[in-house]
Amino acid sequence: MDFGTDDHAEALRTEVRAFAAEHLTPAVRARVAESGNYHDDAFHQAMADRGWVGAHWDPEDGGRGWPRAYSDVVYEELAAAGAPVEGLAITQIIGEAIRRVGTPEQKARFLPSICRGEVLLALGYSEPASGSDLASVQTRAVRDGDGWVIDGQKIFTTAGSIADHVFLLARTDPTVPKHAGLTLFLVPTDDPGFSAAPIFTLSGQRTNTTYYSDLRVDDTARLGAEGAGWEIVNVALAFERGGEFAAQLRRLVEAAVAWARTGDHGTDPRFLARLGRAATSAEVARLLGAYASWSRETARAGAVEGTIAKVYGTEALQRASSALLDGAGVEGLASDRTNESPAAELQHLYRESQIATIYGGTSEVLKTVVAQQRLGLPRPPRSSSR
Ligand SMILES: Cc1cc2nc3c(=O)[nH]c(=O)nc-3n(C[C@H](O)[C@H](O)[C@H](O)COP(=O)(O)OP(=O)(O)OC[C@H]3O[C@@H](n4cnc5c(N)ncnc54)[C@H](O)[C@@H]3O)c2cc1C
């Protein structure tokens, strides 16, 4: 793979930085801090108006046919600026699944409107008793005439209170081995059978418990074949796990450099040593992420490249933010979420990093995936219990 860049990517980088300077206003930051949703409608619409949502999708899907690397530049620059891009990231992950397994009608219905910024989606996999062991989900979808009736509860449905649809993993056949009895649905959140309740994380980010009560959808809400849910989730997970955390590491390093430039902090050799390690980690994470993205686009390697990038990036973010926050001493205690000082940013990133090794698959579980898929170590026998 060529890790080099081209003139268009560099020009795009400059354009995205200027966009962030213009659109990431104090009002947007205040709305995000207030709601806890790392998404802002006006900011998202401005991105869509530039053609940056689903830009790497085919023109018939509403995209611009860009190489994936250009979309990565947009994401990296916006995330490094602290922009609210979680709604963008989640919606694009689900869009990738729709592109691969959706019917022509589903593609026409969702993909161009996602690109226009009109549709926001949320991932509805996890349940209170089914996180790492995702195949054990209990939310039921039962056939009812031409449609389905859905009942159950999901947890950590990020963006669930603002999304238009939830990409919902449900059990449609409890009589077969657990991986085989799952089906995916695109469930509308304006149905009276849907509700969401907030969960706030250590960094003030909002995720949700979502409830599905006698929620009726017709069969056009089913994405992919009945019983194919497990395979489709794995397609989507391959797009969820990647190098996104490199941008957070860069943001951390930039905040630490800004802090070091104040007073005489920049002369502390212990802080500088920590900063050097963080900057090195940020570069390694960036390269692993670029390799994962290239592997995905060219199908030269499996999804394990993204898993490696996710594990490395999130664990490096935890190590580096802990070391740098500690190095900032008492100034790192500034915790007001509207405080944009470099020290407050260090603390915010430290708080955010604590959950990064959990969502999208925990580090413990993902290391097992790497051991099996990259190192060829044996899998434990699959349980057929439900
Ligand atoms: C902020 C946040 C946002 C999230 N957003 C979403 C979302 O949008 N949609 C969604 O569906 N889910 C979301 N999740 C859920 C996330 O994917 C799960 O929390 C995660 O997969 C872990 O599941 P669990 O919480 O049930 O923990 P468990 O699976 O109960 O794990 C508990 C502990 O046991 C360890 N463990 C479990 N199994 C193994 C094993 N086989 N080997 C070694 N160790 C193991 C884990 O590593 C962990 O340390 C989010 C979570 C968080 C915290």
Image: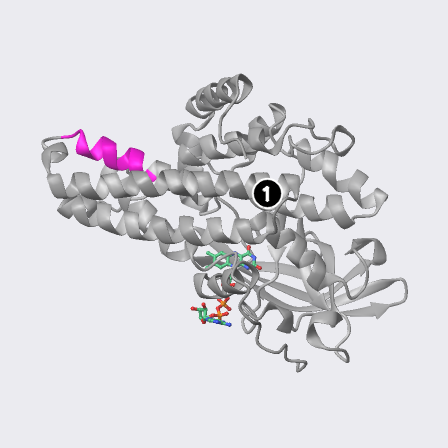
Question: Which residue is at the front of the view, 213 or 116?
Answer: 116
**Could you tell whether 342 is left or right of 167 in the image?**
left
The image shows residue 219 at horizontal and vertical percentages of 84, 58
Q: Is residue 257 magenta?
A: yes
Q: Amino acid at mark 1?
A: Ser
Provide residue 80's location: percent of width, then percent of height.
41, 34
Give me the residue at 62% from left, 64% from top. Answer: 211
Kindly state the secondary structure of the residue where label 1 is placed. Answer: helix
Q: Main secondary structure of the magenta part?
A: helix
Residue for badge 1:
295
Compared across the picture, whether 75 is left or right of 265 comes to right
- Give 130 or 237, whichever is nearer the viewer: 237
Q: Residue at x 57, y 58 (%)?
A: 196
- In the displayed structure, does residue 145 sit left or right of residue 20? right
In the rendered image, residue 78, in percent from the top left (x then y), is placed at 46, 32
Q: Is residue 87 visible?
A: no
Residue stretch in magenta = 252-262
